[in-house]
Image (cartoon, rainbow, N blue to C red):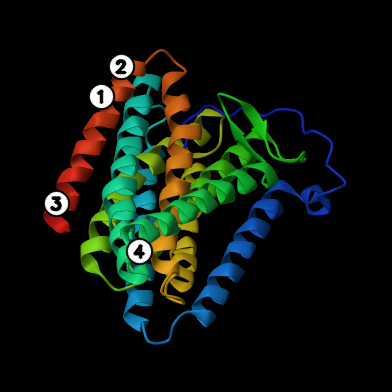
Amino acid sequence: MIAMDPTPAASPRPSPLFPWLRMDPALQFMFMMGIAVVLALLSWVFADTRTPQAMRLGLMAGLAGFAATAIGALPALGLRSLGQRGSDMLLGFGAGMMLAASSFSLIVPGLDAGETVTGSRSGGAAVVVIGMALGVWFMMALDAMTPHEHEHCGSCGPETRMGRVWLFVNAIALHNLPEGMAMGVSFSQADMAVGLPLSTAIAIQDIPEGLAVAVALRAVGMSPFKAVGIAIVSGFMEPLGALIGVGLSSTFALFYPGGLGLAAGAMLFVVSHEVIPETHRNGHEKVATLGLMAGFMVMMVLDTTLG
């Protein structure tokens, strides 16, 4: 989700605590994708069988996000650079949409659902807050355990033999997971008023995100087709995350408001911890902030008209 200019760097020594990190970088990436596939299949198996429509809607939403990432990446076949100013503005726009989506399409419906399930407003709020805390913890754990790269803070997670390009790809795939989970959770009750505006917003911001990823990979000398292909594959985390989200949230009544809170917490963590610092590090704070405000307003309109 973060636009940067990854360049090859010397691979650090693998950590003995993570033996799988000694694998080839591409195999490491596929291994993590495989874990996500297994989790998605388990969520499908244990999902409430009374809600097949919710599962279909959640999967379709995740696939829409995946398709939007692919559409956004395709122009990179002929475009080598966005310019840092334009990149920061687009990322700010996506951050604004994610902030508004977390508020209007996740937290507010979560509070309403929590009140319905618990019978009290304070009880409903407590369920959502606990879910948000779990979402933040979940992203912090992934951030600590998964090797990835951010321009503003360098390499993160355990030591690995991955080069910076693959670390960057990991960061993109890692941050697509909560977006997919948010889509799945929002459709776990087959409620179009909750799921449609959120999924539309995420799909819209996936378009510039896919372009930013593909252009960043081209900037380090990767061939156009390879850069676009990797950017598209990174978006596959969204349908997988959607299956995980809808499967977990449809199992027990409290899991729905809690799941909405979890998805909101995860998305807010990504925006605050990754996107905003990235858009402000190059001296384009004003442009990035205007993009953020525009994204927030667009999402507010979408939530009002589609919700």
In-front residue for pair 17/66: 17
Dot 1 crowding, Cα within 10 Å, few <14, some 14–19, many 20+: some
Dot 3 crowding, Cα within 10 Å, few <14, some 14–19, many 20+: few
Mark nearer the N terminus (4 vs 1): 4
Q: Residue at x 64, y 57 (%)?
A: 32
In-front residue for pair 24/196: 196
Disc 4 marks a residue whose amino acid type is Gly
Disc 3 marks a residue whose amino acid type is Thr
The reply to whether callout 1 and callout 2 are in contact (CB within 8 Å) is yes
State the quadrant of the C terminus: bottom left
Q: Mark 2 = which residue?
A: 286
Dot 4 crowding, Cα within 10 Å, few <14, some 14–19, many 20+: many
Check disc 1 and report its element: helix, strand or loop. Answer: helix
Q: Mark 1 or mark 3: which is in front?
A: 3
Q: Residue at x 53, y 26 (%)?
A: 5
Q: Mark 3 = which residue?
A: 304
Q: Mark 4 or mark 3: which is in front?
A: 4
